[in-house]
Amino acid sequence: MISGNGLREDAEEKQITNTAVRDWLDEYKDAVYEADDFLDEIGYEALWQELEAGAQTLRCQTPKRSIKLEDLQERLDDLVKQKDALGLINRTGKEPSSPKRPTTSLVDERCVYDRDDDREAILKLLLSDDANGQNPGVVPIVGMGGVGKTTLAQLVYNHSRVQEWFGLKAWVCVSEAFSVLRLTKAILEGFGSKPGLVNLDRLQLQLKKRLQGKKFLLVLDDVWNEDHAEWDSLLTPLKYGAQGMSKILVTTRNESVASVVRTVTTHHLKELTEDSCWSVFSKHAFRGENPTAHEELLEIGRAIARKCKGLPLAAKTLGLLLRTQRDVEEWEKILKSNLWDLPKNNILPALRLSYLYLPPHLKQCFAYCAIFPKGYSFEKDELVLLWMAEGFLVHFEVDDMEKGGAVCFDDLLSRSFFQKPSASRSSFVMHDLMHDLAIYVSGQFCFSFTWGKNKSSKSTRRTRHLSFVEDTGGFCSTTGSEIIREAKHLRTYRTFPRFLECHSDFYDEIFQSTIGRLRVLFMTDCSDAMVCSTSKLKHLRYLDLSASNYLVKLPEEVCGLLNLQTLILDYCERLASLPDLGNLINLRHLNLERTGIERLPESLGRLINMRYLNIKATPLKEMPPHIGQLAKLQTLTDFLVGRQSETSIKELGKLRFLQGELHIGNLQNIVDARDAAEANLKGRKDLDELRLTWDGDTHDPQHVRSTLEKLEPNRNVKVLHIYGYGGVRFPEWVGESSFTNIVSLKLIRCTNCTSIPPLGQLASLESLLIEAFEKVETVGPEFYGNCTAMKKPFESLKTLSFRSMPEWREWISDEGSREAFPLLEKLLIEKCPNLAKAIPRHHLPRVTRFTISGCEHTVTHALISPTLIHVIEKNEIKVCALKCVALDLLPMLDSLSIIDCPDLESLCAYERPLNDLTFLRSLEIQKCPKLVSFPLLPSLYSLTISDCSEVELCPEGGFPSTLQSLEIWRCNKLIAGRMQWGLQTLPSLSHFTIGLDENVESFPEEMLLPSSLTSLTISSLEHLKSLDYKGLQHLTSLNELTIRNCPLIESMPEEGLPSSLSTLRLHRCPMLGESCEREKGKDWPKISYIPRVDIS
């Protein structure tokens, strides 16, 4: 038999220059997979017999063994004979030790060298107006792989001047799969919006609204696509940002991409100098030590750095490889390796070397990542579970496999095989060059197929890990089936994105062609019958059935999957019941989030190896009996207290290893408050987030208080939420200064409480929500607590919200509390109708957003505070004393919305001319019926006026020349005087919208609109009968025309529309839509030249 890792290590190095060894190694790996499957089948049969002997009910028959020992032995013997002929030996040398310290999530500028000039050049381009008048300005960074383009972009993205200059920032990794739909969604998310329906038109309209008139920076990292049309489509909603001030920073290896996207000169990023490359290498190789302390390594190290050819990624990777080595021989081995002399084939020699020196188990783990698409963001726990299913973690103790997988992950992260994007908290990526390396080293064993691409590539009989990646071409079951038929020994099948739907025939092909070797299977939107077919998969460890909306009951056949470790059923919203799961003794992770399951099977208590149970957002009412038997459970999202002893909160006390987050619900079911003490929350040092919920009437406030008193958590808790508490006062531990780690606190529906606990003492508290305290009348000094002279109350708080407090009348503080809230940024007060005084006279130097909503009697000093208001919202206010907003007292204001203020008469100035308000970029005024006029605001980019019936004059002196976007809705008097607006004099106006007027019959009048206009929207002009060509003919820059809800328009102008149009949208205009119908309408010849016509 073959002796394992030592022989494989020798072959791994020799196969680089010897194709015969490479062929032998592939055959060796294939045989090892076969042997592993053979042993796994024996283990499965033994487990089956053990369960049968224990009188367990097994509904399905044991699958027959698919591998013959004789054939396998013959194959292995042949490999042994070949190894001698190839000169392969069994190495016993020491492997490089494995560092355990993971890298940080942000760019460490101390490890970046020789990029100051590049950074300043990019900053200069980003922080200046676009001289070419292009919007947005696009700045490309071009350089070879590994030269540091992404690092330079991160340095700029996180620079303080960029933070101050741009109101919105987003970072999106593009990579090779360029989909306008996917990228538009990702950009929306990056700018902090939740994308709506997955429809490109809707998404682009949503993005347009988000960016209109705003100054934004968008980084598109790693762009490969050179298609002008796709780039223009992606750019359409981005053109609505602040004219000349919004920027896109693009990184790419391809000069052709830069020539397509750029509006300014391309910045070419060169390789590092030899000295800088040495600095990067030595920084990582010597771990902060002085390199001169190791003189014997200096000359060798400099020679290695020179071989990195100025590429910081190569220098960093090799530095990390050698940072645990101080042996001259090891350093010389790297320097003299023949890998430096091989053809690169897009794989840097330094990266090959770094891989070659990985321990064998890490090589396996890394190569598996070739199934990910380039640029894919993955979670640590997700990848560890996949490794575990594939058997890559078997050298760890069974009880510690998840922990061992985390060590492997951190090891690869610390060696830069993985990276953590600066914009992400929990996800990771692989550098493109590392992804290329993973594909190279995995060879035929991993295959990732992208629809519409790599059509010439095929899977082989050796393919064990297969992924299908969605592209704009959609799913093609014929091609997919052909690939499956080739890969008969498949171990992994998964899709990207995770919820990619495949036809049922495709899954049938998987079950028929792959001879039952699958260990990892992703099946989305499958039926009960399809799940039944999985019973043949005796090797299966990981089954993901997410979002299977046809799945009502999990078939009992699943219970025959005796090796199953991970079962994911989240978002199977119709799934109502589970079978007896008692046979799944290897199950460790069960995800039932957002299923319809109302009751868990009692057999769950027999799954003694369970580590993770997610029952978030399910209709469960209580836990199954004796849940405390799951003694190894580490993550339990919810514990729902029952009334019986076997489902009581005492069971929670038996789960000693819980960590992360925990929600304890149905606390009203605790009969004896002393039982709560047995949950031992005070001893749970690893619980970070705790939610406590009473759901129902709490008739005995003292009993409820005693219960909460005994549910005191450990001082390590960071997030604490309490819902439905029925006590009159809180126990003393709530608000105690010893809880120094709490950063988020929510107290909601505490309807009997007459006061708020002393929360000002919580030194690390950053976010606080107080909601539905129905009996609180005064927030007084007790709220601030007993802080010392050295500590200010609420010293770390950034967000403070009060909601739904109907009896709250006054907020007061004493002298000792005047310095409270030094870091407060957002203050929200909603639905507090009797509050007469909004806040005491605190000095709030950092507040940028203040919202008051549904507070009928509120008078606030905030309206005359020069540092406070960013946004004022007064919705559904019956009595409002706000008659004038003194804008000069808000000099740093950059965006202002005034909504539903029935008494507002003017925007005025008290102390200085309004010409000094150079920061205000965006102004929105809605539902202010007494407002007559508004002043000239010199730096305004975006102006929206809606439902202001008395406004009849534009500002004295006209609209500001900086104006880029103007929207006028339901302002009849103002619209009637539109010829006096002077829009022709506005050189930057690019977007104009007019809507909801009953008197306009023809639009636009000649010389009304400026030639700079790129977008025109005409909406809900119910009496509009015609478009005036004289008002359109000079709009030579117009790209987009939208006409919505104008039922009386019958046709387009006889002369047609501007030739510059690229998009025409006609919505709810029945007669005009009919006349413009494609190929049929009488006006179709007038518009047929327009690339995109949307009629609905």
Image: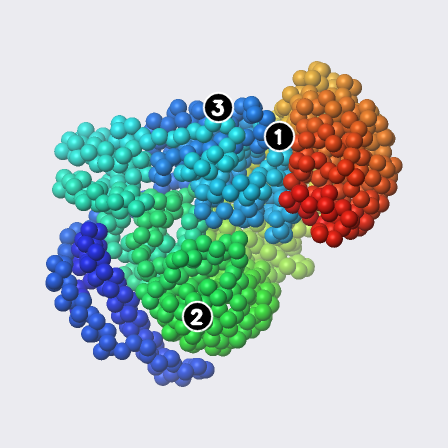
Q: Secondary structure at mark 2?
A: helix
Counting residues from the start of the chain, the first of labels 1 and 2 encountered is 1
Counting residues from the start of the chain, the first of labels 2 and 3 encountered is 3
Q: Is residue 889 left or right of residue 589?
A: right
Q: Residue at x 32, y 79 (%)?
A: 65
Q: Which mark is residue 242?
A: 1
Q: Choose top left, top right, bottom left or bottom right for residue 1029.
A: top right
Q: Give the position of the N terminus as an image quadrant.
A: bottom left
What percent of the width, then of the height, locates residue 416? Answer: 33, 43
Identified by mark 1, the residue type is: Ala
Identified by mark 3, the residue type is: Lys
Q: Secondary structure at mark 1?
A: loop
In whole angstroms, how far apart are the C-alphas of marks 1 and 2? 52 Å
Q: Residue at x 46, y 64 (%)?
A: 479
Identified by mark 2, the residue type is: Ile
* Residue 562 position (above or below residue 419): below
Q: Secondary structure at mark 3?
A: helix
Q: Which residue is mark 2?
A: 510
In whole angstroms, how far apart are the C-alphas of marks 2 and 3? 55 Å
Q: Residue at x 75, y 33 (%)?
A: 1032
Residue density around tag 3, few if under 14, some if 14–19, many if 20 or more, within 10 Å: few
What percent of the width, then of the height, locates residue 613? Answer: 48, 62
Q: Which residue is mark 3?
A: 124
Q: Which mark is residue 1014?
A: none
Q: Choose top left, top right, bottom left or bottom right for residue 983.
A: top right
Q: Residue at x 45, y 67 (%)?
A: 481
